[in-house]
Image (tube, helix red, strand yellow):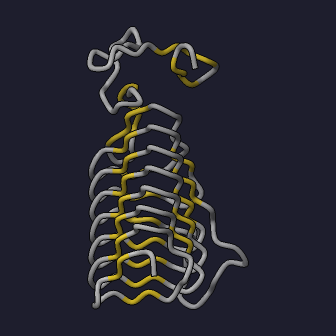
């Protein structure tokens, strides 16, 4: 085994990357795929049709349901809620669950709810307690219920100025269509 599993974790899959850490009272089902160097905190549940990339942090109290795809370097805060069925009924299951995609370097704050079928773009940030009801563009900051766009964020995580400049790392961005892009990228 090339990953760490706490003695009180239940791990049913062999698809776990090197140097990943899985802590107490986590339950990971047989079909789940988890990349390298991830940190899966206490009291998490990961269903079968879930793919998690490399260097992902999943804080305590997160349940990741079938259909969720999490790319590299994503942060999932404590008690984030994912859904996967837009019309849930007891003992009635869809032929296929909705797919939710969290793109690389996105960060989702504590207690946010991510409604099924949405894409959270690269480097975006979702504030604590927010309810995400639609796709989130790259490098944007969203919060509230329902979550609304509140600005743009740099790849380093700082909020950009109105001129799309980062005061911390000095990077500059420009509009390309409906999204922003790092100048020179």
* 148 horizontally vs 48: left or right: left
Residue depicted at x 70% and y 74% = 96
How many marks do you count on the picture? 0
Position of the C terminus, as image quadrant, is top right
- From the viewer's perspective, is residue 34 above or below residue 146? below
Name the residue at 35% across, 77% down.
Answer: 4
Which one is in front, 78 or 56? 56
Q: Residue at x 40, y 37 (%)?
A: 148
Quarter of the image where one finds residue 112? bottom left
Q: Residue furthest right?
A: 95
Q: Position of residue 77 (x, y in %)?
A: 30, 57
- What percent of the width, then of the height, locates residue 27? 40, 84
Q: Residue at x 54, y 21 (%)?
A: 181
Q: x%, y% of residue 44? A: 35, 76
64 versus 74 height, above or below: below
| In this rendering, position of residue 6 left or right of residue 132 | left
Q: In the displayed orientation, state which residue is furthest to the front.
A: 2
Within the image, what quadrant is residue 99 found in?
Answer: bottom right
Quadrant of the snapshot with the N terminus: bottom left
101 and 184: which one is in front? 184
- Residue pushed farthest top? 163
Residue 185 against residue 103 in the figure, above or below: above
Query: Residue 176 at x, y = what percent?
Result: 61, 18
């Amino acid at each position: 085994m090339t990953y760490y599993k706490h003695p009180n974790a239940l791990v049913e899959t062999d698809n776990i990357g090197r140097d990943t850490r899985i802590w107490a009272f986590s339950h990971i089902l047989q079909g789940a795929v988890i990349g390298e160097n991830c940190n899966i905190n206490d009291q998490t549940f990961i269903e079968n049709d879930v793919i998690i990339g490399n260097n992902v942090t999943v804080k305590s109290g997160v349940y990741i349901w079938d259909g969720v795809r999490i790319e590299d370097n994503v942060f999932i805060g404590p008690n984030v809620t994912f859904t996967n069925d837009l019309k849930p009924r007891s003992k009635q299951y869809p032929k296929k669950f909705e797919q939710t995609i969290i793109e690389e370097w996105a960060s989702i704050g504590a207690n946010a709810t991510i409604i099924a079928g949405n894409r959270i773009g690269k480097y975006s940030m979702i504030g604590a307690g927010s309810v995400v009801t639609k796709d989130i563009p790259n490098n944007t900051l969203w919060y509230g219920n329902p979550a609304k766009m509140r600005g743009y964020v740099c790849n380093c995580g700082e909020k950009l100025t109105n001129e799309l400049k980062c005061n911390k790392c000095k990077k500059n961005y420009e509009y390309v269509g409906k999204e922003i892009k790092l100048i020179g990228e």
